[in-house]
């Protein structure tokens, strides 16, 4: 059975973007990016809410990103190699390869995907992930806490979900970010 992982970079007050939609403070530096590349390397499928997908398409469509450094090229190649499922009621077409649109989030379909997938899967952003939390589909959390309080914005985790977690690991980075790795306790 493949695992479904929720991954997010959030402020200390648990927002992935501030009230103006900014998340420049969440951009990983080289050390964090290297770590994220290695976390993402084994993943086979990304489940994206439409908004998160739109912030990620540059990894395939904007070649200047990959040209910035070998590290960025590595991430672009990882991203392009993975399968992507975008959940959206409005998106008419996708602009990246290995990508399909789903019009509804069907927990049973995701459960079946987990049962048949050969590689782990990841879910983001928070609106879509909230539905996966509510359906009990999220097995692990890769949470990066950025050293900032933004006072509001887009919450990383929903209010109406209660999950007991086991801490599997943590890491502190030179830029003040902290990585917390949890798994859902059954
Ligand atoms: N901190 C970081 O590193 C970082 C990185 C990237 C982005 N961000 C931020 O993260 C946020 C993105 O997350 P988000 O929570 O706002 O949005 P999201 O979960 O990525 O996308 C929400 C959209 O997904 C679609 N969707 C959700 N549930 C659905 C369902 N059951 N059936 C069909 N479609 C469904 C809808 O698209 P339609 O409206 O098309 O129907 C909905 O508007 C943005 O604020 C972005 O700026 C932060």
Image (spheres, rainbow, N blue to C red):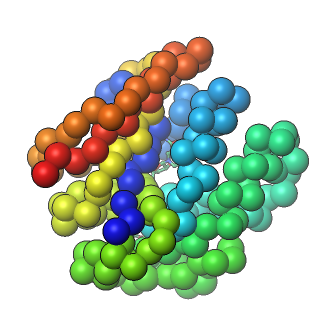
* Quadrant occupied by the N terminus: bottom left
Query: Which residue is rendered at x = 29% and y = 57% of the image?
Result: 138
Residue 81 seen in this snapshot:
yes
Residue 74 drawn at (x, y percent)? 75, 49
Instruction: Give coordinates of residue 124: x percent, y percent.
Output: 43, 56
Left or right? Give the position of 5 relative to 173: left
> Up-down: is 171 above or below 131?
above
Near-viewer residue (169 or 62):
169
Quarter of the rendered structure image containing ligand 1: bottom left
The structure residue drawn at horizontal position 76% and vertical position 44%, both measured from the top left corner, is 72
Q: Is residue 142 left or right of residue 68?
A: left
* Residue beneath the point at 58% across and 17% down: 175
Instruction: Count up the numbered dots.
Output: 0
Q: Is residue 137 left or right of residue 38?
A: left
Determine the image quadrant of residue 125: bottom left
Q: Position of residue 94 (x, y in %)?
A: 62, 78
Residue for point 31% across, 80% down:
112
Residue 55 visible? The answer is no
Vertical arrangement, residue 111 with respect to residue 139, above or below? below
Q: Is residue 155 above or below residue 136?
A: above
Viewer-side residue, 64 vs 97: 97
């Amino acid at each position: 059975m493949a695992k479904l992982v929720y991954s997010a970079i959030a402020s200390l007050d648990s927002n992935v973007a501030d009230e103006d939609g900014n998340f420049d403070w969440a951009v990983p530096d080289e050390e964090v990016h290297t770590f994220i590349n290695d976390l993402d390397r084994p993943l086979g499928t990304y489940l994206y809410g439409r908004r998160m997908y739109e912030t990620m398409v540059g990894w395939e469509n904007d070649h200047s990103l990959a040209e910035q450094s070998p590290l960025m090229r590595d991430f672009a190649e990882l991203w392009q190699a993975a399968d992507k499922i975008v959940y959206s009621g409005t998106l008419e077409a996708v602009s990246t390869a290995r990508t399909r649109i789903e019009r509804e989030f069907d927990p049973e379909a995701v459960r079946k995907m987990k049962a048949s997938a050969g590689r782990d899967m990841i879910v983001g952003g928070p609106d879509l992930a909230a539905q996966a939390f509510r359906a009990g589909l999220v097995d692990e959390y890769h949470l990066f806490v950025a050293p900032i309080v933004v006072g509001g914005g887009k919450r990383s985790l929903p209010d109406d979900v209660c999950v007991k977690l086991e801490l599997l690991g943590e890491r502190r980075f030179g830029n003040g970010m902290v990585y917390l790795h949890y798994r859902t306790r059954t």
